[in-house]
């Protein structure tokens, strides 16, 4: 990992406007660099020495929440198997306690399940006001959270790990109620002050020179974005910080019991559950064998992307921070993991006639499937939420995506291909063959930029003001709404011009016109929202979801 931080910063910022800050710790030394670009097409300039900018770290805030829980468990104040039914009524005032009507499934949720995303709680609460707002979180209060918990009837936990911002918001509020202090105050008193992290906080200091004046300018692609503020969701994503502060935090965790955080840091690094081919502890995700684990967490808000990476066995850590929602902040970490946990790079000759036996849909769980398609003498593969990529035959029943450090090993039963295991970056995801139909082709030459690429805007009185960003890349279509992630959409069989996401129940119907689509209609939740295509096309940067096979 002995890269030059400035080279990493320039790489992750790419051609986007905004700023990037990188901190690398190796050989017992810290190395830092910040670069910025004022506008698309301009050169990325190095920040002046000492000009340390603030970035929103998004979901890396969950690691702070996990550490607060680890500290509480070490003190004996809380236990991992304490339930919401035990903790919430005892922490609320009399009126709130009477109003709280937790169903048995919610009352039985434990702190262990909240901190490992196995609580069965949804990613976001049903009573959340507007995820598409420029600054969506400040209006969501503790009272709204308690009302949602009373209304919910999820499956009885534990569930398979499914990422839940709501679960961590609940955990943050449980800790706040238990100690009678705001989540931010707990973080300040128990983490940032002891570690002398003077530039890490939820609310910006009032003095502009210390707060807003230091914030890196947020962007989403070419467009300026908003800073995000938080109330009851603070524990899920509210912190702002700098590269030096975050590297201090990572080093303190790696130091374990003998470091400044004591036994709680050692506790945070221990696995508690499985998660999408990896393991998870107190929010930290981990890959690799115990003696060579890599710990990490990513974060994202409307205008920022970040990743924290730690490798205690070699004494190395990294923080990557970018003030553009389309930047590839995870790319550096992906390269590090691929180098630490290498897959084979062989390439064997394979009879094209043998490829159809691998085609089909292989399912890991209810949410995650792998789809393989034979086209033009190649086997294409993709994972739920990702696009198709041509695979390399590496050995009998083994294919790889060398550029992504991914290996797909097929298993047989009675001589027929019946299963598959993805091995990537120190993790494994097994899957079984299903009877679900696979599409006939992976890419379509008719899916072109001329036909589809562009911005589609809603018009008309009373219509919500929405901006759809659509891109055709190598015969596949990608789309997103507002500040949401850019994800692939796939042709709906038998419905010309209709495409569907596979990670959300929503479809796009494109209206044909001479030279390409003139408009689209979003079909979701019983609604049909029309948007017309406008002049100009978005940037052709590689979409964030193009990091194939990883999850």
Image: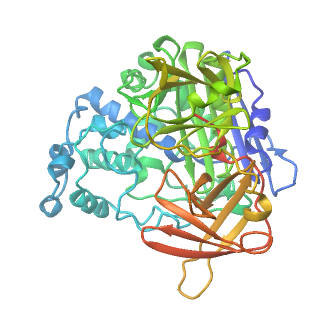
Q: Residue furthest top?
A: 291
Residue under the point 21% across and 33% down: 81
User: In the depicted view, which residue is nearer to us: 499 or 433?
Assistant: 433
Residue under the point 20% across and 41% down: 83
| Residue 482 visible somewhere in the drawing | no
State the image coordinates of residue 4 (x, y, percent, origin top left). 78, 27
Q: Quadrant of residue 281?
A: top left
Q: Is residue 148 left or right of residue 427?
A: left
Q: Is residue 399 left or right of residue 100?
A: right
State the image coordinates of residue 527 (x, y, percent, origin top left). 46, 73
Q: Is residue 530 left or right of residue 93?
A: right
| Residue 217 visible somewhere in the drawing | yes
Residue under the point 75% across and 34% down: 8
Which quarter of the rendering shows the N terminus?
Answer: top right
Please determine whether, in this image, residue 387 is positioned above or below residue 362.
below
Please determine whether, in this image, residue 312 is positioned above or below residue 177.
above
Q: Quadrant of residue 66?
A: top left
User: In the depicted view, which residue is nearer to us: 164 or 374?
Assistant: 374
Q: Residue furthest front?
A: 353
Please determine whether, in this image, residue 93 is positioned above or below residue 341.
below
Q: Is residue 475 left or right of residue 54?
A: right
User: In the depicted view, which residue is nearer to us: 185 or 529?
Assistant: 529
User: In the depicted view, which residue is nearer to us: 422 or 461?
Assistant: 422
Residue under the point 57% across and 44% down: 199
State the image coordinates of residue 46 (x, y, percent, origin top left). 82, 42
């Amino acid at each position: 990992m002995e890269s030059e931080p400035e080279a990493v910063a320039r790489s992750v910022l790419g051609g986007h406007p905004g700023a990037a800050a990188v901190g690398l710790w190796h050989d017992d030394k810290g190395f830092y660099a910040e670069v910025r670009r004022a506008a698309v097409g301009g050169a990325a300039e190095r920040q002046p020495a000492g000009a340390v900018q603030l970035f929103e770290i998004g979901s890396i805030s969950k690691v702070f929440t996990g550490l607060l829980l680890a500290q509480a468990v070490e003190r004996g104040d809380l236990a991992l198997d304490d339930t919401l039914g035990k903790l919430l009524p005892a922490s609320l005032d009399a009126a709130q306690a009477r109003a709280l009507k937790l169903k048995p499934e919610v009352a039985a949720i434990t702190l262990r399940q909240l901190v490992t995303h196995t609580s069965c709680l949804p990613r976001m609460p049903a009573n959340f006001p507007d995820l598409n707002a420029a600054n969506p979180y400040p209006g969501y209060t503790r009272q709204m959270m308690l009302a949602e918990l009373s209304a919910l009837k999820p499956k009885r936990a534990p569930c398979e790990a499914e990422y839940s911002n709501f679960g961590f918001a609940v955990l943050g509020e449980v800790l706040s109620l238990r100690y009678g202090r705001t989540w931010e105050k707990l973080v300040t008193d128990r983490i940032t002050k002891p570690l002398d992290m003077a530039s890490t906080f939820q609310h910006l200091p009032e003095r502009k020179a210390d707060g807003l004046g230091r914030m890196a300018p947020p962007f989403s692609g070419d467009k300026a974005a908003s800073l995000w503020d938080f109330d009851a969701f603070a524990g899920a994503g509210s912190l702002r910080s700098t590269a030096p502060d975050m590297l201090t935090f990572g080093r303190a965790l790696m130091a374990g019991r003998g470091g400044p955080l004591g036994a709680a840091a050692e506790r945070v690094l221990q696995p508690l559950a499985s998660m999408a081919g990896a393991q998870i502890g107190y929010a930290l995700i981990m890959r690799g064998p115990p003696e060579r684990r890599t710990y990490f967490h990513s974060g994202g808000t409307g205008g920022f992307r970040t990743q924290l990476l730690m490798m205690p066995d070699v004494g190395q850590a990294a923080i990557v921070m970018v003030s553009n929602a389309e930047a590839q902040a995870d790319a550096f970490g992906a390269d590090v993991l691929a180098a630490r946990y290498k897959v084979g790079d062989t390439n064997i000759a394979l009879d094209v006639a043998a490829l159809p036996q691998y085609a089909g849909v292989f399912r890991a769980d209810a949410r995650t499937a792998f789809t393989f398609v034979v086209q033009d003498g190649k086997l294409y593969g993709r994972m739920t939420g990702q696009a198709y990529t041509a695979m390399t035959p590496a050995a009998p029943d083994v294919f790889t995506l060398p550029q992504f450090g991914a290996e797909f090993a097929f298993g047989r039963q009675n001589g027929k291909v019946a299963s598959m295991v993805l091995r990537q970056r120190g993790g494994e995801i097994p899957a079984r063959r299903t009877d679900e139909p696979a599409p006939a082709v992976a890419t379509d030459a008719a899916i072109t930029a001329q036909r589809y690429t562009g911005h589609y805007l809603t018009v008309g009185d009373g219509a919500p003001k929405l901006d759809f960003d659509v891109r055709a890349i190598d015969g596949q279509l990608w789309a997103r709404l507002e500040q949401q992630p850019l994800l692939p959409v796939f042709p709906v069989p038998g419905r010309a011009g209709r495409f569907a996401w596979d990670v959300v129940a929503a479809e796009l119907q494109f209206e044909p016109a001479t030279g390409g689509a003139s408009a689209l209609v979003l079909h979701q939740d019983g609604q049909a929202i029309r948007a017309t295509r406008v002049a100009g096309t978005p940037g052709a940067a590689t979409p964030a979801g193009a990091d194939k096979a990883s999850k």
